[in-house]
Image (spheres, helix red, strand yellow):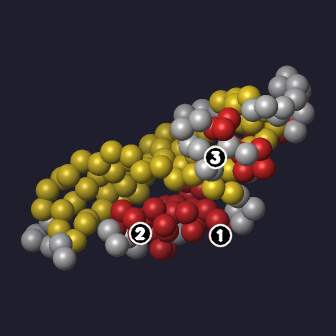
Amino acid sequence: MSIVSEIMSAIRSAILTAYPTKLELVNREDLAMNPDHILGNGFDVLIGSATNEGEMGGRGNSFQRNISVILSKRVVDSDLQNDSKHDTEKILLDEMIAIASLLKTNQPVVQKVLNLECVGDAGISVTNAEKVKFISTQLDFNIKYVEFYN
């Protein structure tokens, strides 16, 4: 298994251990297409582009890669101008901060990367599903790791 596959598995595992009620999104490209029960407390890990930074002393190649974590929450009341929306946004913001911190300190993740940095987020957006509304965000990370030669 490649190191990037192991990193992705370690990130998923860390999130599910810290947040055991979270469910993995089935459609990351169009959040509204996810079932309501998943989107209500959902997450996903996206593997983005990588840059090969060259050989590391004949052992393997060093890479910089973008990885993102999507988080979603259901807004309980359909009126997005009330306290329910703001309370849900606060919960989502707290999760964002906690997950960014978790991934920098989680041993199975840290052992596989040379560096992991949270480089930003996408803010909070609203998704209108059939009868309910959801908010979501995307945390963006830059990781550096080595894929070793076999």
Disc 3 crowd rating (10 Å Cα; few below 14, some 14-19, many 20+) is many
Decide: marks 2, 3 in contact (CB < 8 A)?
no
In this view, 20 is above or below 95: below
Report helix, strand or loop for mark 3: strand
Report helix, strand or loop for mark 1: helix
Precedes in sequence: disc 1 or disc 2: 2
Q: Nearer the viewer, mark 1 or mark 2?
A: 2
Query: Tag 1: residue type?
Result: Thr
Residue placed at 22% from the left, 71% from the top?
A: 148
Residue placed at 87% from the left, 29% from the top?
A: 78
Q: Which residue is mark 3?
A: 71
Q: Which residue is mark 1?
A: 17
Nearer-the-camera pick, 22 or 29: 29
Tell which residue pokes out farthest to the left in this image: 58
From mark 2 to mark 3, how far is it between C-alphas? 21 Å
**Which x, y percent locates residue 129?**
75, 32
From mark 1 to mark 3, how far is it between C-alphas? 15 Å
Disc 2 crowd rating (10 Å Cα; few below 14, some 14-19, many 20+) is some
Q: Which residue is mark 2?
A: 6
Image quarter in which the C terminus is found:
bottom left
Query: Tag 2: residue type?
Result: Glu
Q: Is residue 11 left or right of residue 127?
A: left
Q: Can residue 49 be spotted in the picture?
A: yes
Residue placed at 49% from the left, 68% from the top?
A: 10
From mark 1 to mark 2, how far is it between C-alphas? 16 Å
Query: Tag 3: residue type?
Result: Leu
Q: Is residue 34 left or right of residue 102?
A: right
**Which x, y percent locates residue 86?**
81, 33
